[in-house]
Image (cartoon, rainbow, N blue to C red):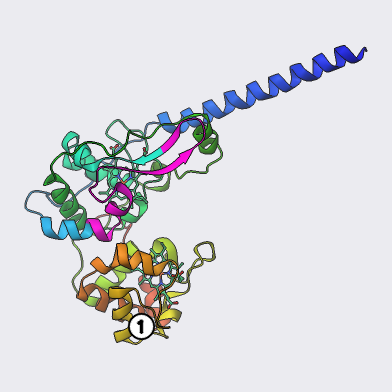
Amino acid sequence: MRLKHKFAIFLALVVAVIALTLWRVMAVSSGILEKHYARPDNPLAVPVAGADVKDGERLAHMDGCFACHGQQLTGRVLFTGPFGTKLVAPNLTRVVRKQSDAQLATVIRYGIRPDGTTLINMPSTRFLASSDQDIAAIIAYLRTLQPLPDATPASSWGLGGRVLLAMHFFRVTAESTNTTMRGPRLTPTEPMALGRYLTQSQCAACHGRNLKGDPEESSPDLRFSLKHYSQDVFERFFTTGVGRRGHGTRVMTPLIKSQFHYLTGADVDALYRYLSLPAGAVTSMTPATAQSPHA
Ligand code: HEC
Ligand code: HEC
């Protein structure tokens, strides 16, 4: 075969491989963005009307809604990629006007929009561990907000973002939740139950469900860390971000300053008491928590 022919065949092969890859990327990413999920029947067992609005505002800070959705909740860009790719945590002051309480509870806890499609990278698994009472309070608070203009246009999925979607770079929220699961109906008040509730809804995402630490997050075993903390120093840590060594730590200190200083005094006390229990008590109490179906 002449060199010219060989080159033409090679070129045709390269073009075919590129076309196939592009087709695959579009098919996989569209499959993710357009898939419809079944919505849970009754996502909230307590009414939003009459929920504690002031507590809802505190919880929205503690749960990081402001950290991601912007200081006025009018939206924030979380990720920008090549070819017009942008992931935006949307303007909640407007979203709440368009959705019912049940729709909002479903989108927050299960990452499923009213049209059945998934959110991308919204940490709904964390809010699945929150009580119905807390979610109702957050929704009640969001309903008090004046609708404000969007701080940024909505998410958009250009080719770069679709490649990243197809490569599982983003978390497909609805895939990580389970619509048969519910959080507790009411927020516990008894210290050990409150401590267990808070560790599961606030700490487990990084320190692991069994709180033994997660190498991927470089987070330590919480019960082990607590051995180095007196109750006073623990309280100081969770109010100011100053740790046991007299200075801040890389991840916890900014997190405390933006979110965890919204924990109440009773919350911090309950966390300390719960994490100081003997090892068997903490791990044996863990699996029974959040994410169990409603009675
Ligand atoms: C780690 C960042 C992060 C945190 C924390 C977070 N969100 Fe989100 N949120 C997102 C992203 C990202 C999206 C959706 C982006 C997409 O799919 O386009 C989203 C979407 C939403 C939507 C869906 C809007 C729609 O289009 O229907 C609601 C409602 C929402 N968030 C409420 C909340 C509330 C309430 C909190 C606090 C309890 C919260 N979010 C905390 C990142 C976050
Ligand atoms: C976003 C991930 C994340 C979350 C959520 C989180 N932690 Fe941590 N935590 C870390 C990491 C990472 C470290 C290691 C030190 C650092 O980088 O701040 C740590 C360290 C600690 C330490 C040891 C600090 C020291 O002096 O070395 C304590 C105590 C602690 N966390 C308690 C908690 C409690 C209690 C919660 C829930 C209320 C929580 N953390 C939630 C990531 C997290």
Kind of residue at badge 1: Ser
- Residue 89 vs 202, above or below: the answer is above
Query: How many discs appear?
Result: 1
Left or right: where 171 falls relative to 240: right
Q: Is 236 left, or right, of 284 in this rendering? A: left
Question: Quadrant for ligand 1?
Answer: top left
**Screen quadrant of the C terminus:** bottom left
Which image quarter: residue 294? bottom left
Q: Is residue 213 visible?
A: yes
**Which residue matches tag 1?**
276
State whether label 1 is within 8 Å of ligand 2. Answer: no
Q: Residue at x 20, y 75 (%)?
A: 266
Residue 36 lies, with reference to residue 10, above or below; the image says below
Residue nearest the observer in this picture, 288 or 262 = 262
Q: Is residue 157 left or right of residue 234?
A: right
Q: Please, is residue 127 above or below residue 213 in the view?
A: above
Q: Which residue is the extreme one toward the right?
A: 1
Magenta range is 60-86
Whether residue 73 appears in magenta in the rendering, the answer is: yes
Q: Position of residue 123 (x, y in %)?
A: 37, 50
Task: Identify the secondary structure beneath mark 1.
Answer: loop
* Residue 287 visible at all: no
